[in-house]
Image (cartoon, grey):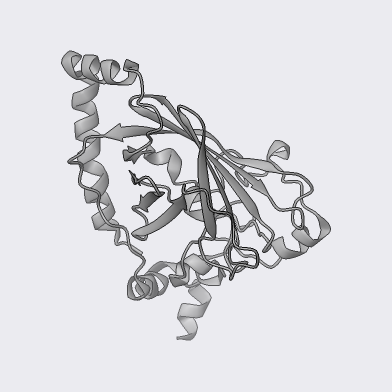
Amino acid sequence: MEKIPNMRKHFVAPRVVLTVLIFSPLARSQMKGQKAAPPPRHDISGIWEPGAVGIQGLGASAMPEDGKPEHRLPYTPLGLEALDHTKPSNGVRSVLPAETNDPVVYCDPQGFPREDLYELRTTQILQTPQKVVLLYQFGKIWRVVWTDGREFPKDPEPRWFGYSVGKWADDYTFVVQTWGTDERTWIDRAGRPHSGDLRVEERFHRADHGTLELTVTIDDPKMYTKPWVALDRLRFELQPPNYDVREMICSPSEFAEYNKLIGTPASDKDRQ
């Protein structure tokens, strides 16, 4: 985990830049012109920034665990049983940070689809004729989406990020299917569970030259009675090619220090 002073450094400068952009007529004109330009065909490459909406501290942004009836997921009995075993540190079921069993706070890989559904930060996308590569800021993780026509492996060994294949649905929409994920991961920060039968669909839609939209659909019949949309056209803004992406890496030593100062209940501190 990162120290608070560093996070402040990270966010102050963008606010200043954003203020300049908002009040500069020339900048507004340039940004408007970039967005209005027609997007290139079969191309989602670039450095893409989702902004604060990508953090998703209460769970998947389209279905946060906020106690609202409309955000109640269609759990199966097995899904509810699995949900009872997760102890998130955010949302309506939250526990104290020191009591959570969230794998990510111990620096386990987020896995997939959680990489899309928690701390989705600046994302770099590279394309070759055989594959699309996604480089995520959080954890400095990458994924490979194969576009060479291959099928999923018949009996895959579970992977943190599964196996992904993609194809173009039209000139501006790239569709990715992923399965074979590791059951130890959570779907999101709210502790939503999944089984080894999980299938995830991502739809990357290039709305215009400067805007990319991501929709994520979860399909796991063992845990949920029907598919549900976790992200609904979450918007990314295209950044300049020379944009420097700041690293965000889980540090076990910093997490232990955080628990000493903040996360451990006061009663436990008294006993130490």
Name the outermost residue toward the right. 77
From where the camera sits, is residue 152 visible?
yes
Q: Position of residue 238 (x, y in %)?
A: 31, 33
Residue placed farthest to the bottom in the image? Answer: 272
Q: Is residue 92 visible?
A: no
> Across the whole image, how many numbered discs are drawn on residues?
0
The quarter in which the N terminus is drawn is bottom left
Estimate the x, y position of residue 78 in percent, counting from the top left: 79, 62
Q: In the rendered view of the protein, which quadrant contains the C terminus?
A: bottom left
**Closer-to-camera residue (66/132):** 132
Question: Residue at point 16% right, 15% down?
Answer: 26
- Place residue 208 in its image quadrant: top left
Q: Residue at x 35, y 52 (%)?
A: 135
Seen at 66% across and 59% down, the residue is 194
Residue in the image at 61% along x and 58% along y: 191
Instruction: Residue 198 in the image: state x and y as whole percent.
Output: 66, 56
**Is 121 drawn above or below residue 84 in the view shown?**
above
Q: Nearer the viewer, residue 150 or 3?
A: 150
Residue toward you, 92 or 63: 63
Residue 52: where, in percent of width, then height?
40, 40
Q: Is residue 37 left or right of 115 when viewed as pictured?
A: left
Q: In the figure, 152 relative to 12: above or below?
A: below
Q: Is residue 130 left or right of residue 176?
A: left
